[in-house]
Amino acid sequence: MLVWIVTAGAVLAAAPRATAQARVIEITADSDSRYKIAGQRTPEITVKAGEKILLRVTAHRGKSWNRDGSIHGFTLLRAKDRTRVDGWDLLFKPGTQEFLLTAPNEPGAYEVVCTVICSEEHEGMHMKFTVLP
Ligand SMILES: [Cu+2]
């Protein structure tokens, strides 16, 4: 079985073994302009610095989307200065997709924000992201 992985705009097929060391984090980017994580009332992602992450995203269309077909985004910002983290600027299409990512090396508080105007609730589409040492 092949698993499709999208990294920084490039699509490649990788055997499951290649992703075996990455921790899988599953989120939903939902039609009500909310990120959701099963079992969490308030979704929050916690990772270790430099950890390999396989982000598995299921996205559902809200009331509006980008002309390129992206329906939600996922951009990681440093909480202290709202600057973007390289490699963590993602766009989602409808359905399930996976991204092989490397957690920031700098421990601290981060925030995930949606970068697609997905509804009038778009501004509320964000979640905490914590990097542990
Ligand atoms: Cu959104």
Image (cartoon, grey):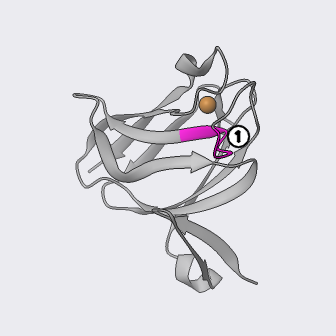
Q: Which residue is mark 1?
A: 38
Quadrant of residue 103 in the image? bottom left
Quick check: 64 left or right of 130? right
- Examine the rendering and report whether any part of residue 20 can be seen: no
Q: Is residue 82 above or below residue 68?
A: above
Quadrant of residue 5 in the image? bottom right
Quadrant of residue 16 in the image? bottom right
The stretch drawn in magenta includes residue 41: no
> Is 44 in front, or is 83?
83
> Is 128 in front, or is 125?
125
- Examine the rendering and report whether any part of residue 59 can be seen: yes
What type is the residue that disc 1 sits on?
Answer: Ala
Q: Is residue 87 above or below residue 37?
A: below
Residue in the image at 67% along x and 58% along y: 97
**Label 1 crowd bin: few (<14), some (14–19), many (20+), radius 10 Å:** few
Quick check: 83 left or right of 129? left
Numbered range of the magenta stretch: 67-73
Q: Position of residue 77 (x, y in %)?
A: 34, 36
Which type of secondary structure does the marked residue at label 1 adopt? Answer: loop
Q: Quadrant of the N terminus?
A: bottom right
In this rendering, the count of numbered labels is 1
Quick check: 24 left or right of 29? left
Q: Position of residue 35 (x, y in %)?
A: 62, 33
The prevailing secondary structure element of the residues shown in magenta is loop
